[in-house]
Structure formats: C-alpha cells, structure tokens
Image (tube, coloured by chain):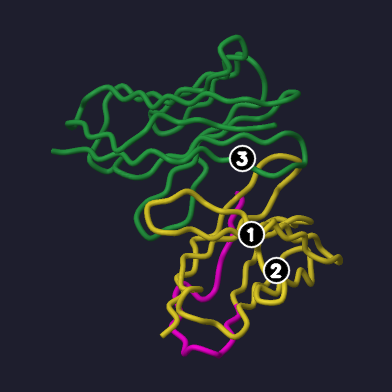
Chain colours: A yellow, B green
Amino acid sequence: GAVVSQHPSWVICKSGTSVKIECRSLDFQATTMFWYRQFPKQSLMLMATSNEGSKATYEQGVEKDKFLINHASLTLSTLTVTSAHPEDSSFYICSARKGFREQYFGPGTRLTVT
Amino acid sequence: GNSVTQMEGPVTLSEEAFLTINCTYTATGYPSLFWYVQYPGEGLQLLLKATKADDKGSNKGFEATYRKETTSFHLEKGSVQVSDSAVYFCALTPVAQKLVFGQGTRLTINP
C-alpha cells in the first residue's frame, strides 16, 4: 500500500499564532513531498516541494517565511504557518511521491484562523 | 509546457447512468496520466493511472485509456452509483516532476 497521514485533521487557532501540520508516509519512504492549498470548490494549488535533507522549493507567490517547510526524514515533512491570519484559513493537503511518478495524498488539514 | 484540461462541471446524472468525464492534455515527452477522486472534506485518492500510450487504467468500475494520438485520458464508468458523487481530477506528471492537475469536475449522482 501507500498511505499518507496528516496531523491534525483540523485546527483552529488565534490570529498571530503559529500552527504546525505534519505529513507522514506510513509504509514507504518518500524523498519528495509536496504541500498544496485548496480553496473551496477549486483545484489544488502547489505551494512547495519538499526534499529530504534540503531546503524546500517554493512556488512563485508563496511566502517562504510564512510557510516554513521542514523535511527532516524520509517519512516526515512539516508545514508551519507562522503568525497566522484569517486569510491563511484553508484546506492544506500534503502528498508524498513513491518512485518517480506516483503521488499519494494525505487526508488534508483544515485550518481556521480566528 | 504541461497542462491538463478537463470537462467543465458540475455534472449531474441519475443512478445507473453512463459516465464520461473528458480530459485532454499537453505535455512534452511521455508523461504518466492519473485520475484522482476527492470526496467532501477529504484529501485526494488515486483512482487509476496509465503510464504509456494505449495503457488502460481501471479501478472500481472506472476506466480510462491513454490515447497519445488524441492526447486524451477520458474517464468512463458504465453505471454510476450515488456513492460516486465526488470531485474528479485528471493529472499528469513527467518523470520525477510535479503533478499538473486539471481544474476538477464535480459529479453528483441522484438516486
């Protein structure tokens, strides 16, 4: 199988605080993980590509200082939303690449900033 | 560049109807093609895939054939169920590169 988990599945935080989201590949090693953001009724927007042991590559327009990504091991990547604001409220989804082509997605994390 | 164009939704069908969701692509080289499904409030699940021309991917009654001559990967199912209601994404990836998604097609099946 190829299972990817995310934690937490939902989180509510106050404006100005930071939130960390974990993405784990449970039964395979992933040298590359991806972080996406999805707005209601829209497709996924790639935020960044995370490679184990190196700095993440951010897509154009994504603030790297706001969305901190760490890929500490072959099974774990984390996304930290720093100094969160209401406009950061969204559905965040990670994926892990198995082999050279297939990506498996986590169940998503719904972030609400009040 | 690489791109995917999906049939615009939403699509509404009655149970047991035949389903087709069109997907065409533009790509350099020989990408792999995928269909993902997203149920409300969840992440994406890989539904089926095809890695080379004329391959047919199939799963849970859904099928799609990699047509290089028409650059298409249309999703079909012979008899849909209410439980198939979801958003379907067509996607492609060249080797070791990012997934490129279509815009998604929302499917609603009425009993």
**Residue positioned 68% across, 26% down in the render:** B27
- Across and down, in percent, residue A24 comes to 64, 66
Mark 1: secondary structure? strand
**Residue positioned 75% across, 61% down in the render:** A50
**Residue positioned 64% across, 62% down in the render:** A26
**On the image, numbered disc 3 is attached to which residue?**
B100
Task: Give the mark toward the camera: 3 or 2.
Answer: 3
| Type of amino acid under label 2 | Ser
Say which chain tag 3 marks.
B
Can you say whether A48 is above or below B53 in the image? below
**On the image, numbered disc 2 is attached to which residue?**
A77
**On the image, numbered disc 1 is attached to which residue?**
A47
Q: What stretch is highlighted in magenta?
A: A1-20
Classed neighbour count for the residue bearing mark 2: other residues with Cα under 10 Å, few (<14), some (14–19), many (≥20): many
Cα–Cα span, label 3 and label 2: 21 Å
Cα–Cα span, label 1 and label 3: 13 Å
Labels 3 and 2 touching (C-beta < 8 A)? no
| Type of amino acid under label 3 | Val
Classed neighbour count for the residue bearing mark 1: other residues with Cα under 10 Å, few (<14), some (14–19), many (≥20): many
Corner quadrant of residue A72: bottom right
